[in-house]
Amino acid sequence: MPARRPPPSPRPVGAATRGTTNPNRLRRMDRWIAAVHGPALRRCAAPVAVDLGYGAAPWTAVELLHRLRAAEPRTQVVGIEIEPTRVEAARTYERSGLRFVHGGFEVPLPDPSVRPSVIRAANVLRQYDEEAVAAVWERLCARLAPGGLLVEGTCDEIGRRHVWVALGPEGPRTVTFAARLGSLDRPSDLAERLPKALIHRNVPGEPVHAFLRDFDRAWAAAAPYASLGARQRWIRAVRDVCGDWPVRGTGADGLRRWRQGEVTVDWSALAPRST
């Protein structure tokens, strides 16, 4: 009798992205994950991070391993791609602590019993309808280990401007705006990089539009600080918006993040008014 073939693998959930990527594109997101979630990684028995939809080249997964191991040397990274040819091409970059697998939003891992501590999905949901985002978030958050973190957002082609949402198993937590400050004329320049859940909400009457409007006003009022550099102007503007918006990290740790060109706001303050 002919040998029985194994059943086919389930079809990955999702659709292939364009695959465009560049080295160092996700550095701002990586730095934030390492700084903010590093303590949680160190508490994990075997921390695993996922680079979901890394694209046509595996650079972002390689860089994620390097940056997270600076925070916790035991961290392992799994790059997941829905396009099989991209997975095969990436296999030559595998090393200790770095694997590449075929899959999608089901987040398959080499060891099915493992749940990831971090899932990073950058520039993945941009191609989807806004109505699909909540279901994808829910699916990815369900795969997280207890205390895990999903980071989903969008950046420009060389990583100068980036906005992402951080979620836990309970749902969205925060929104972070990050930029190379020398590239900004005003904070609302970041609006073009809002993640899919917010990109169509930058209109009057929506909280994210009001936040960016207030941030622009604070930026304008902080113009005298421009003589000290864009960083000092940014810090002054962030201090001003703290009076009206729930900005995370107003102490020494927050100041370090502001100096990196970041500001993080509670999701509840920016969430769309209607779904």
Image (tube, helix red, strand yellow):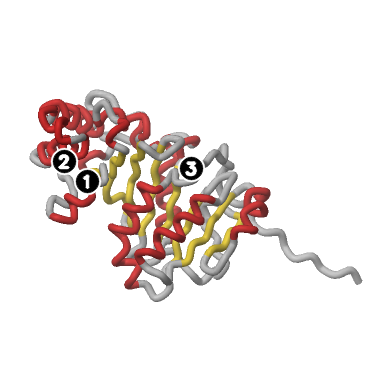
The residue under label 2 is which amino acid type? Ile
Nearest to viewer (mark 3 / mark 2): 2
The residue under label 3 is which amino acid type? Val
Residue under the point 34% across and 58% down: 34
Farthest residue to the bottom: give it: 45
Q: Position of residue 8 (x, y in %)?
A: 71, 59
Residue under the point 10% across and 37% down: 240
Describe the element under mark 3 as helix, strand or loop. Answer: loop
Residue 6, compared with residue 247, is above or below; it is below
Residue 3, compared with residue 83, is above or below; it is below
| Residues at marks 1 and 2 touching, judged by CB atoms closer than 8 Å | yes
* Residue designated by label 3: 124
Return the disc, 3 or 2, that comes first in the chain's sequence: 3
Neighbour tally class for label 3: few under 14, some 14-19, many 20 plus, Cα within 10 Å: many
Query: Quick check: 235 left or right of 98?
Result: left
- The residues tagged by marks 1 and 2 sit, at their Cα atoms, a distance apart of 7 Å
Q: Position of residue 220 (x, y in %)?
A: 15, 26
Q: Give whichever of 128, 254 is nearer the camera.
A: 254
The residue under label 1 is which amino acid type? Arg
* Residue designated by label 1: 259
Q: Answer whether residue 266 is visible to the viewer in this image.
A: no
Q: Position of residue 67 (x, y in %)?
A: 40, 58
Describe the element under mark 2 as helix, strand or loop. Answer: helix
Q: Answer whether residue 108 is visible to the viewer in this image.
A: yes
- The residues tagged by marks 3 and 2 sit, at their Cα atoms, a distance apart of 30 Å
Query: Quick check: 75 left or right of 219?
Result: right
- The residues tagged by marks 1 and 3 sit, at their Cα atoms, a distance apart of 28 Å
Residue under the point 17% across and 52% down: 249
